Image (cartoon, rainbow, N blue to C red):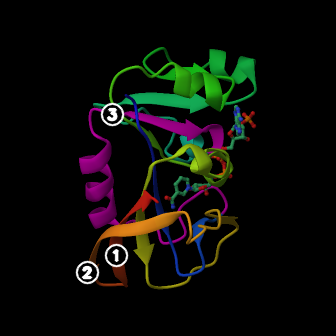
Amino acid sequence: MTQINIIAAIGANNEIGLNGDIPWGKFPEDLKHFKSLTIHSTIIMGRKTWESIGCKKLPNRRNIVVSRDINYLNKIKKDVNCFQSIKSAIKSVTIGDIFIIGGSEIYEQTIDLSKKIYLTQIHKSFDANTYFPMINDDDWKTVNCISSFNNDFGYSFIELDRV
Ligand SMILES: NC(=O)c1ccc[n+]([C@@H]2O[C@H](COP(=O)([O-])OP(=O)(O)OC[C@H]3O[C@@H](n4cnc5c(N)ncnc54)[C@H](OP(=O)(O)O)[C@@H]3O)[C@@H](O)[C@H]2O)c1
């Protein structure tokens, strides 16, 4: 049975994006973590997140991009799968787990469908204009939390399971 998971990195104020990019810039430890979790699975992203990663497929994963604009989707290369709705994107996955990789609009619409949230919590606030949806504490329990530091900030890799 395919499980839907969310994966996101958030700042101290739930921020995830600034003007189409990541607020904190490069964060190699998180990229490594992201890769280890999503490799060989299916990732689903919104059109703006697709553009934020330079419209380049992330290797060794099935990449799905959602947009309501069929003309936009028709221009995307064939090695990436495209859907006009999140529902049809999810329905197309019959093998392995799904990781919803953002952004805000897609998280908002899938958090209620998800069984797990893999959250990188950065213990610092940043300028931002895009945010992760509110997590209802009654719905989620922390099952794992590993904290560390890099040169710029402390951070925790947190795993939440739906209660
Ligand atoms: N920190 C993190 O973990 C993280 C992760 C991902 C992204 N981000 C950041 O978040 C920002 C982007 O997030 P965002 O919320 O602005 O955009 P987004 O969620 O990536 O993409 C939004 C677009 O997705 C399409 N869409 C939304 N709902 C849809 C639906 N139900 N069916 C089909 N298509 C649908 C629409 O595309 P059309 O307009 O083409 O129809 C919409 O404009 C960037 O700054 C990015 O760097 C951060």
* Relative horizontal placement of residue 14, taking residue 143 as reference (left or right): right
Q: Which residue is mark 2?
A: 148
Query: Which portion, as a residue range, is magenta?
Result: 19-48
> Where does the image place residue 89, in percent across and percent down from the top left?
56, 25
Counting residues from the start of the chain, the first of labels 1 and 2 encountered is 2
What is the number of the mark on residue 41?
Answer: 3
User: How many angstroms separate mark 1 from mark 3 (CA)?
Assistant: 23 Å
Q: Who's the residue at 33% across and 63% down the image?
A: 30
Rendering quarter of residue 18: bottom right
Above or below, 96 relative to 53 = above
User: How many angstroms separate mark 1 from mark 2 (CA)?
Assistant: 6 Å
Counting residues from the start of the chain, the first of labels 1 and 3 encountered is 3
CB atoms of marks 1 and 2 within 8 Å = yes
Could you classify mark 1 by the number of other residues whose Cα lies within 10 Å: few (under 14), some (14-19), or many (20 or more)? some
Membership of 126 in magenta stretch: no
> Where does the image place residue 117, in percent across and percent down from the top left?
44, 57
Which is nearer the eye, 117 or 161? Answer: 161
